[in-house]
Image: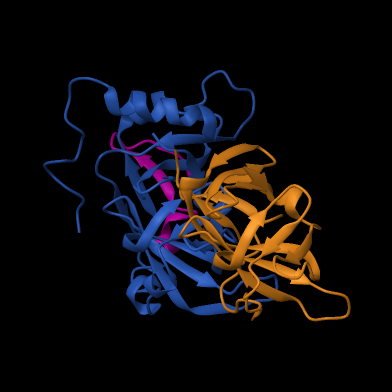
Chain colours: A orange, B blue
Amino acid sequence: MTSYAQARGLPVVTLGDAREIGELTSLALDAVAGRLTHVLVSGRGRKETAVAWDALHAVGPDAVLVEPDFRPESVPPGPRHEALGSRVLSEDGAEHGAVQDLVFDPSTGRIETVVTTLGEVRGDRLLGLGDFALVVRAD
Amino acid sequence: MNELMGARELCGRPVVTLGGDAVAQLRDTVFDGPAGRVTGFTLSGRGLLAGPLRKSLPWAAVHALGRDAVMIRGQEVLVEPSAVVARKEAAHGQVLGARVLTDAGTEIGVVLDVVVEGGRSGRVVGFRINARQSLVMGSRRRRRKVFVPRGETLAVSGRALVVPADAVRFVADDLAGFAARVEAFRARGGAAPDGLEKGPSA
């Protein structure tokens, strides 16, 4: 297991030629699917790009390695995908603090646990992430 | 029983989809007085300066009425205001400020707020009233704000509403204590609720 807090700031390096393409700035979450979909990378003086989870070779303690043939994508448009700092609302309309960290399986991107300011929420309870809140199933 | 809330405190509560987007905020609560439930809500846009929204939220589309937000499945459940507002004048406008009479003919106070049950029920469980002294035996204050449960049938006509006479034995000082009093009131044994056969006069 890895967490968002541990992964943030890691160098992102290509597997083939050990080229550093930048630093991991954030992780894109698909709350409905309960998994991370992209790693967002910003290089020096370059625009933020997204690397799809399938193109990752490993998320290690000291670096993120991407497959040599990866294709940088533009940052996924549309629905909000940054979970960190988001308010947490249960589906019954009660607040449960804010998101502090996400614990995930690095090979699949599946969310194991959402760490909130008021405790932990299992990853299979995620319902949606929008401009107002991360909504979780009532337990 | 789910958490109880005063309808007046609902104003401004955000309307949030299960996808996490805030799409509106509550403006006014619309009641079906005779049925004793919430019909729906009128809405305003998000933010301090936002005006009325040309959409409303029927109760049937509410996923849950919560302490911090009203949850809906998605923005598509919002409807034209006319679907909810048609009853507004008939119900909400006349409940606040209405005199509360018991079915024995005693006036016990004036309605300050309507208490609804959160979650999915949308039930009106009682009223916050400015109580007359006769209700509060031994109190030295002339008037006092208390919560009183409503009867099974709720007659709202003109400027008054009628509650069962024994409802005054189940008043509470705050919302936290009110939930238990409402349960006790409902569980009280014996007689069928007054007015059930007769029904409210038209």
Q: Is residue B111 visible?
A: no
Identify the residue at image location x=32%, y=37%. Answer: B105
In the image, residue B152 above or below residue B90? above
Identify the residue at image location x=35%, y=63%. Answer: B61
Residue B38 in picture, x, y percent from top left: 37, 56
User: Is B113 on the left or on the right of A43, as rendered?
Assistant: left
The image quarter containing residue B141 is top right
Residue B4 in picture, x, y percent from top left: 47, 40
User: Can you say which quadrant of the picture contains the C terminus of chain B?
Assistant: bottom left
A139 or B129: nearer the eye?
A139
Q: Is residue A29 visible?
A: yes
Identify the residue at image location x=35%, y=23%. Answer: B184
The image quarter containing residue A17 is bottom right
User: Is A103 on the left or on the right of A127, as rendered?
Assistant: right
Residue B182 in picture, x, y percent from top left: 38, 30
The image quarter containing residue A63 is bottom right
Q: Which residues are magenta?
A: B92-111
Magenta residue check for B107: yes
B161 or B181: nearer the eye?
B181
Residue A81 in picture, x, y percent from top left: 61, 66
In the image, residue B164 above or below residue A78? above
